[in-house]
Amino acid sequence: MTIQQATNHKSAPEPAIDARVTIGHTHLKVSNLQRSIDFYGAVLGLEVMQRHGDDVAFLSAGGYHHHIALNTWQSKGGAAPPPGTTGLFHVALLYPDRAALADALRRLVRAGVPLDGASDHGVSQALYLSDPDGNGIELYWDRPEPDWPRGASGELAMHTRPLDVDALLNHQKD
């Protein structure tokens, strides 16, 4: 069966994907590998696990083989895509708790990296910024699931409200 035939085939809906499936890594095209390594390493705190010259590097948190890969194979010296084009909106890095997100915010402040936004989504608190190539980045932590906002029928009721960045900046480990 071709993909087109499968798309047109009317049958019972497929079951949801296995809940254990996760997004393993993101691979970004960058214009300057060292500049991007400096940002993702020194600013965000990821560790370079492997590097191949000026072509590609693999970075991670906690010793995993890689969460983010950076390459210049088709983009060395290139420009960011112009606004209004399709593509990746952002890469999201999930922090284990609010204190870890506060630590990340303090790293950004020390490095002079501006925020593009900061939001409370009810289920999470998030910081938004751009890497040196204009790729969007979200740094966030999830509230415990019992604390997620729910509607009258129990449905998830996420929202976007301003995040008190000063309160986050002053948050210390519990």
Image (cartoon, rainbow, N blue to C red):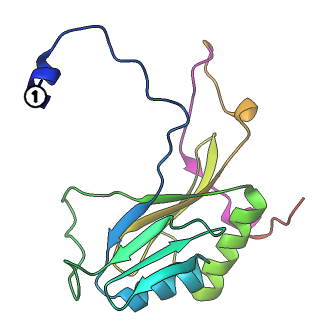
Asked if residue 153 can be seen in this view, the reply is yes
Q: Residue sitting at 41 percent across and 18 percent down? A: 15
- The amino acid pointed to by label 1 is Thr
Position of the N terminus by quadrant: top left
Q: Residue sitting at 66 percent across and 71 percent down? A: 104
Left or right position of 18 against 62 = left
- Image coordinates of residue 46 in percent, x first then y, are 58, 75
Left or right position of 89 against 1 = right
Q: Residue sitting at 57 percent across and 26 percent down? A: 156
- Image coordinates of residue 2 in percent, x first then y, are 10, 28
Q: Is residue 52 magenta?
A: no
Q: Which residue is mark 1?
A: 2
- Magenta stretch, main secondary structure, is loop
Q: Residues within 10 Å of mark 1 (few under 14, many from 20)?
A: few
Residue most extreme to the right: 174
Position of the C terminus by quadrant: bottom right
Residue most extreme to the front: 1
For residue 132, what is the image quadrant?
bottom left
- Image coordinates of residue 100 in percent, x first then y, are 73, 64
User: What SS does tag 1 mark?
Assistant: loop
The segment highlighted magenta reads 154-167
Asked if residue 113 can be seen in this view, the reply is no
- Image coordinates of residue 148 in percent, x first then y, are 68, 33
Residue 22 versus residue 104 in the image, above or below: above
Tag count: 1
Which of the two residues, 144 or 45, is positioned nearer the viewer here? 45
For residue 90, what is the image quadrant?
bottom left
Q: Residue sitting at 46 percent across and 68 percent down? A: 68
